[in-house]
C-alpha cells in the first residue's frame, strides 16, 4: 500500500546518510590516511630541523677575555697588551666561520710589534650571543661600533679584517670614516667569490638540514679547502678547535646559515669606493692560491676602487693565509702600520 511505501522511503531517508557517511569514512581512512600522516610527519620533521628561535648564548664563561652586553648581542672580547707603551690600537675582525681564537695568533704578532690588539667574537660565534636577527652587514657593523663605544676605544684606531671580517671592516669604515685611521683587508669578501654556492642557502629546508645535521662535516670540509698544507700541525689544531665549537656553540649553525643567506658577499662595491674616496691608508693582503676569494680581486680593488692601496701577495697562501702564513701576514701589516706612523 501507499502508506507502506511512504514509511520505507522515510526509513531510507534516515538510514542512507548514516550508511553513506560510514562508507565514505572507511574509504577516506584507507585512501587518505597515509597521505595525511606523511604530510603531518613532514611538517613535524621540518619543525624539528628548524633552528631554535629567539636569543641563544653560551652559558660557560670564556677562558680568556671578558663579555660586554651590547644592544646587538652580548659580545666576547680579548685584549692582547704589549709589554711597553702601545703604539696604537688595532682591532682584528675574524672571518665567516671563525672566532677570536682564529685571529689571536695574528693579534699576538701585532702585540709583539708594540700594538695593543683587540679581538672579539662576531655575532653567534665563539662566546658571543645571537638574538635571532638577520645576519646582515649592518648587524656586524653595529656590533663593532657598539663595542668600540663600550670599551672606550680611541677616536681613531687601526682595523684589520680577514674574509668576512674584511667585508665588515670596509663597511664599518664607510659608515664611521673618522674612526678608522688605517684599513687592512686580508682576502676580504664584498666583490667576488670563486663560487656562488652561498646563493643555494636561500632555498628552503635543505640548508637547514646541512647546517643542523651535518654542521661538523660542512665546516671541516670548508676548512680543508682553504688550507695549503693540511699536514701542518696548525691545521690539526684548528680542526680540533672547530670540532669542539660545533659541540659547544649553540648558535653556531644558525649564525652561519643566516650570514650565508643575508650578508652581501659580492655587493660591497659602494663601501670599497668609499674607502678609495677617503684616501685612507689601506693595505690588501692575499694568498696567491686562494680558492674562496680569487687573488685577482686584489688588483681589481687597487685599479677600480682604492688606488692608494698597497697590495701584498703571499705565495702559496690560500684563504686561511692569516693563520697558515701568520708570520708573513703580520710582517706585511706591521710594516704598513709603521710606514703610516713614520716609525720605519
Image (spheres, rainbow, N blue to C red):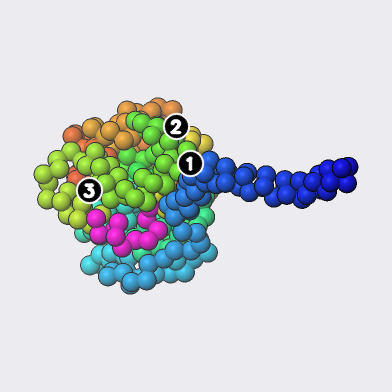
Tell me which residue sits at (57%, 46%) in the image.
26
Side of 233 where 81 appears, left or right: right
Label of residue 305 in the image? 2
Which is closer to the viewer, label 2 or label 1?
1
Question: What is the distance, in whole Å, between disc 3 and disc 2 at their CAs?
Answer: 27 Å
Relative vertical location of residue 113 with respect to residue 83 in this rendering, above or below: above
> Is disc 2 placed on a helix, strand or loop?
helix
Mark 1 is surrounded, within 10 Å at the Cα level, by few (under 14), some (14 to 19) or many (20 or more) other residues, namely few
List x then y, in percent, for residue 178: 50, 52
> Is disc 1 placed on a helix, strand or loop?
loop
Which is closer to the viewer, label 3 or label 2?
3
Which is closer to the viewer, label 3 or label 1?
1
Secondary structure, magenta segment, majority class: helix
Mark 3 is surrounded, within 10 Å at the Cα level, by few (under 14), some (14 to 19) or many (20 or more) other residues, namely many
Question: What is the distance, in whole Å, between disc 3 and disc 1 at their CAs?
Answer: 34 Å
List x then y, in percent, for residue 116: 31, 62
Label of residue 323 in the image? 3
For the residues bearing labels 3 and 2, Cβ distance under 8 angstroms: no
Tell me which label, 2 or 1, sits earlier in the chain.
1
Residue 247 lies within the magenta run? yes
State the extent of the magenta-drawn residues as a range: 243-253
Label of residue 204 in the image? 1
> Is disc 3 placed on a helix, strand or loop?
helix
Residue 50 lies within the magenta run? no
Label of residue 45 in the image? none
Mark 2 is surrounded, within 10 Å at the Cα level, by few (under 14), some (14 to 19) or many (20 or more) other residues, namely some
Q: Nearer the viewer, residue 289 or 313?
A: 289
Q: Nearer the viewer, residue 249 or 48?
A: 48
Number of marks drawn: 3
Q: Nearer the viewer, residue 296 or 134?
A: 134
Residue 66 showing in the rendered view: yes
Amino acid at each position: 500500500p501507499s502508506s507502506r511505501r511512504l514509511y520505507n522511503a522515510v526509513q531510507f531517508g534516515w538510514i542512507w546518510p548514516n550508511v553513506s557517511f560510514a562508507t565514505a569514512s572507511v574509504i577516506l581512512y584507507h585512501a587518505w590516511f597515509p597521505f595525511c600522516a606523511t604530510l603531518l610527519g613532514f611538517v613535524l620533521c621540518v619543525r624539528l630541523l628548524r633552528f631554535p628561535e629567539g636569543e641563544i648564548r653560551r652559558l660557560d664563561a670564556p677562558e680568556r677575555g671578558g663579555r660586554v652586553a651590547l644592544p646587538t648581542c652580548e659580545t666576547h672580547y680579548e685584549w692582547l697588551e704589549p709589554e711597553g707603551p702601545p703604539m696604537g690600537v688595532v682591532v682584528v675582525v675574524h672571518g665567516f666561520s671563525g672566532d677570536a681564537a682564529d685571529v689571536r695568533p695574528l693579534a699576538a704578532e701585532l702585540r709583539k710589534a708594540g700594538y695593543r690588539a683587540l679581538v672579539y667574537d662576531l655575532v653567534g660565534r665563539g662566546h658571543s650571543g645571537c638574538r635571532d636577527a638577520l645576519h646582515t652587514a649592518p648587524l656586524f657593523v653595529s656590533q663593532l661600533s657598539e663595542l668600540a663605544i663600550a670599551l672606550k676605544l680611541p677616536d681613531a684606531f687601526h682595523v684589520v679584517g680577514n674574509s668576512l671580517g674584511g667585508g665588515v671592516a670596509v663597511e664599518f669604515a664607510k659608515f664611521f670614516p673618522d674612526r678608522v685611521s688605517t684599513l687592512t683587508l686580508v682576502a676580504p669578501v664584498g666583490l667576488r667569490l670563486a663560487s656562488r654556492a652561498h646563493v643555494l642557502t636561500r632555498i628552503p629546508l635543505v640548508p637547514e638540514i646541512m647546517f643542523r645535521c651535518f654542521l661538523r662535516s660542512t665546516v671541516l670540509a670548508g676548512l680543508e679547502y682553504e688550507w695549503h698544507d693540511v699536514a701542518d700541525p696548525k691545521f690539526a689544531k684548528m680542526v680540533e678547535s672547530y670540532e669542539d665549537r660545533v659541540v659547544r656553540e649553540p648558535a653556531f649553525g644558525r649564525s652561519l646559515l643566516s650570514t650565508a643567506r643575508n650578508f652581501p658577499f659580492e655587493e660591497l662595491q659602494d663601501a670599497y669606493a668609499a674607502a678609495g674616496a677617503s684616501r685612507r691608508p689601506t693595505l690588501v693582503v692575499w694568498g696567491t692560491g686562494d680558492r674562496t676569494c680569487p687573488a685577482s680581486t686584489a688588483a681589481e680593488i687597487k685599479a677600480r676602487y682604492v688606488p692608494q692601496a698597497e697590495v701584498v701577495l703571499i705565495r702559496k697562501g690560500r684563504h686561511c693565509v692569516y693563520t697558515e702564513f701568520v708570520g708573513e701576514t703580520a710582517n706585511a701589516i706591521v710594516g704598513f702600520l709603521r710606514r703610516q706612523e713614520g716609525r720605519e
